[in-house]
Image (spheres, helix red, strand yellow):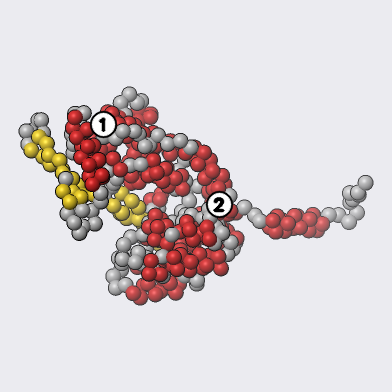
Amino acid sequence: MECRPGRERPYRARVRWTDPTSKRRLSKSISVATPEEAQAWIDGMASAAQGGVDPLAATKRLAEYGESVMTLALRGLERKTLDPYLAGWRKRVVPTLGHIPVRMITNGAVDRAVHSWIADECSRSTVKNSLAVLVRVLEQAVRDGIIERNPAQVTGWQREYRRAADELDDPRALALPDWDALTRLAHALVERSANHFTGWADVVIFAACTAARIGEVSGVRAEDIDRETWMWTVRRQTTPSPGGLIDKGTKGKRARTVPLIEEVRPIVAHRLDAVSKPDARLFTGPRGGRITTAVLRDATHWDEVVTQLGYEHLRRHDLRHTGLTWMADAGVPVHVLRKIAGHGSLSTTQRYLHPDRQSITDAGEALSAHLKARRSPTGPQLRAV
């Protein structure tokens, strides 16, 4: 261990060992903030070596480690179970947690991963299979001596799933009430952010008015906007991956067209005028980086702001619920709303059509008027007794 003053992580820990097969002399080092962290890392590497584990395996990221032990971790499973486990690993575990070193995966990281799968409207069985394969891989890491306990053995996720499912049965309850509430939120987030970055307001307003996911907003490029018709063709989304953030196709792999209403056209026009290349991103962070829901949350102190405004349960994804609810209230037909939302199932879209009390009252009055118009003046009449 050595100390290099003046650096953000001044303590450098290094270990050396001889590979018993190749007889090559190998080494691995890490820079940390405190001597305690450095010593803990050295002790962990030494413990792994004494247990017969390749020290390099102890530093692998989850995606790489999982691929190397998958056959062992999933031994004994039937084919009908193996396929959904591997799909859960490939489509959810790796994009969410694959870039994190095995030793650094915590209960909190797993909790956030499971919550993100639920927020993406994955089915209960999909969440279960994705979590199950993660548990098995990390259980192998426990047996290998890389970690002391399995952080994926979380409890309560099914209760969280039920709560999310209940919310999605009535997504209208998650929406902001009106335009003023949206602009107040947008301005408050800017005020709370570092250097009062106004781009956060643009992201929030654009997401709500287009009913888009934050990853899709991050993926917008100049060439996706038709300025003559004010239409946005949604082709991609930004998502975490083992190598960092990447752009990939939209959920469901289907491009869709979304109208850009008058309220967001000045925002879009200003950003189109500011870029020179058709593949330039329209929305980026203050340093030009890609945006994710986590970036938006941390940069704007989202949780603190929404609590102060009285929307303590509002999440970034609820901007999408807001847009779809407003469109439904504006009378957009359900088959059109489904195309704008990109929903695979019509039943998902219909959840946004729950009528309010006035609509129910109007429906009753309309039925009464209809019956009165068709009632024969000489026919039998019902009388109160």
| Residue at the (86%, 54%) spot, across then down | 376
Q: Residues within 10 Å of mark 2 (few under 14, many from 20)?
A: many
Against 351, residue 296 (above or below) is: below
Left or right placement of residue 153 versus residue 366 in this view: left
Answer whether residue 287 is visible to the viewer in this image.
yes
Pointer 1 or 2: first along the chain:
1
Residue 286 percent coordinates (x, y): 34, 66
Left or right placement of residue 212 versus residue 242 in this view: right
Please name the amino acid that badge 1 sits on.
Gly
Badge 2 marks a residue whose secondary structure is: helix
Q: Which residue is mark 2?
A: 171
Q: Quadrant of residue 267?
A: bottom left
Residue 153 percent coordinates (x, y): 40, 34
Against 333, residue 137 (above or below) is: above
Against 19, residue 368 (above or below) is: below
**Image quadrant in which the N terminus is located:** top left
Q: Quadrant of residue 69?
A: top left
Badge 1 marks a residue whose secondary structure is: loop
Q: Which residue is mark 1?
A: 145
Please name the amino acid that badge 2 sits on.
Pro
Find the residue positioned furthest to the right.
385
| Residue at the (11%, 33%) spot, across then down | 19
